[in-house]
Image (tube, coloured by chain):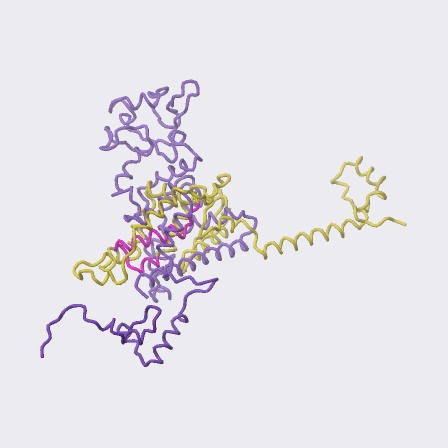
Chain colours: A yellow, B purple
Amino acid sequence: MPKIKKEIRPIVSDNVSDAAGQVLTDALDSGFEIDDIVSDRGPKIRGEETFSQEGLDEIVNLSSEGAPIPGQSLTNDPDQPYPWEKPATFANPREALNEISNLLLQPEAMKNIVGALANGAAVADLSTAVLYAKFFEGEINADTMLLLVEPVMYLMMAIGEEANIQYNIEGNDLDEFEMDDDEETQEKIDEFKNVFSKIKKGGSEKIEPEKINTNSLPQNILDRVKEKSPEIRGLLSKEEE
Amino acid sequence: MGLFSKIKKGLKKIKKKVVGGIKKQFKRLKKVVKKVTKSKLFKAIATIGAIIVTGGAAIGAFGGSLASSTFGSWMVGASNTITGGTLFGTGGNFLAQAGNFTTKMLAKPFASAGKAIGSVAGGVSDLTRLTTKQGRMGYRLDEATGKYFVDTEKTLKAGSLKGQTVAELKAATPGENIMAIGKGVDVTTGEVMAGTLQSAPPSGFSTMSSGQEFAGDAAKAVVDPKSLTGSKWGDFALQTGASVGGSIATGYALNELTAGDPTGQMAGLAVEGREPKDPLRIYQAERAMSFNDIYQNLLYGPADPFSAASTELYKQQTIGMPSYA
């Protein structure tokens, strides 16, 4: 059990990503290991997109339903406005998020979300679809919809992580986090070069038997080193003339 | 630009910004936190983000070992601090004074969310075939008979049911089965739940072999669990991914929801702009025609519109009207 070094410090942030980052660094500074926070559950299920003719046919059928004629909305009776033209059910974004979170964390919804993520749907797309639908139904207004994009995305990401799925965040970026970026690749190359040069440098130096710590090796091995020491040289050392 | 076009554009812009923020945060932490695998780091960010968003309720919701872990306890403390309004700003800080939405929203998160859903997430791992419901419930498959037996050590304290098959338990009447003992099994942990269940199955839940049904008290709160969003498009977007699969379908649906206004496609990579209208504007300008009177001028067909409009064909009377001298 890790010893907690310090108490939680107050965090002020204007977005969830930054707040999560601060909490994580704070937790690690407080003495937690990453394994205390998240456990390893083995290899993840890859949420790769797969083509489905059935799905495509369904889309084609839906798209053939037609769209409204330009200006059609203006012919509506003002006494019977569309849901999004009325005051929103949830005026407070916090209450709206409460409602949506409760809905998303229900078993049926979770199964759908996990299934969708496992089939390659992106978190950003699913989140916006849910929020847009809520706006369309008149539960939230347009401003609230935009404000809730990030919290809802985090909720869906956590569901995906809990289900051990490697999911897309936006588009087809499944392996983006696993891949090394250019900076990281350069760092690794530099590190390799340093190690290599150290080996090269160390290899060119002769082993001096008198400098060997006599307490760390048995005497018989030390005797053998002394006996063979002129012959022990680094792989890259020059041949003696 | 209409209302929906503006909304779609705004949604697209925000989506890009949020995704960019998440990726930027991940890259920042990757540099700060060394010797941690990327997947673990990202999982930690996502989990903590969800805990913050739900005001700590996600800890209970996702169950597993997180709630009972040291970090879980620490985070609950953090969550309490959030709930108390000190972590994400009080009235004293600048952001709160400036009316920052996030500060306000997170300063008083909803403590109720997820309280009734602690047993739900286990089903998720079943779906991904990481676990099985039987395993979580403490049932053991007898390979010889192919029947599920109750693993009494894991599921029940009482030994009276040892060796009984699930089928036998299902066949038993209320009063002789699990319900009669008054103990239920937590579907997430497989542990015996504290307290006493009802002596008879709640209405709508006639069997006791299913873990989800035991968690029925939570499920009962759902008004319409079959409809996630309450609308065709929202449900479609999620269920398409789940049932027929593929981001082609979901992507199309989302494109329908969030894409910008359609523009005409010209040859090559050119996109329809204002330029094609220029000849028409020049034509009108040359003939001193006003844009406001556009509908009074004939502009279609191969003939010169100006001269065509003056021909008898377009001047003939189509409906007989009485003339008054």
Q: Is residue A80 left or right of residue A123?
A: left
Q: Residue placed farthest to the front in the image?
A: B312
The residue located at (31%, 20%) in the rendering is B168
Q: Can you give x and y, in whole percent of width and height, for residue A217 in the image? A: 75, 38
Out of A131 and A15, give the one closest to the viewer. A131
Q: Can you tell which quarter of the image residue B278 is in?
A: bottom left
Image vertical order of residue B190 relative to residue B298, above or below: above
Residue B11 visible in the shown view:
yes
Image vertical order of residue B212 relative to residue B171, above or below: below
The residue located at (35%, 26%) in the rendering is B157
Q: Does the magenta portion include B154?
A: no
Q: Quadrant of the N terminus of chain B?
A: bottom left
Q: Is residue B178 left or right of residue A46?
A: left
How many numbered markers are drawn? Answer: 0
Q: Can you give x and y, in whole percent of width and height, for residue A186 in the image? A: 62, 56
Q: Can you give x and y, in whole percent of width and height, for residue A78 in the image? A: 18, 62
The residue located at (30%, 63%) in the rendering is B3
Q: Which residues are magenta?
A: A120-147
Residue A37 visible in the shown view:
no
Q: Quadrant of the C terminus of chain B?
A: bottom left
Image vertical order of residue A39 relative to residue B201, above or below: below
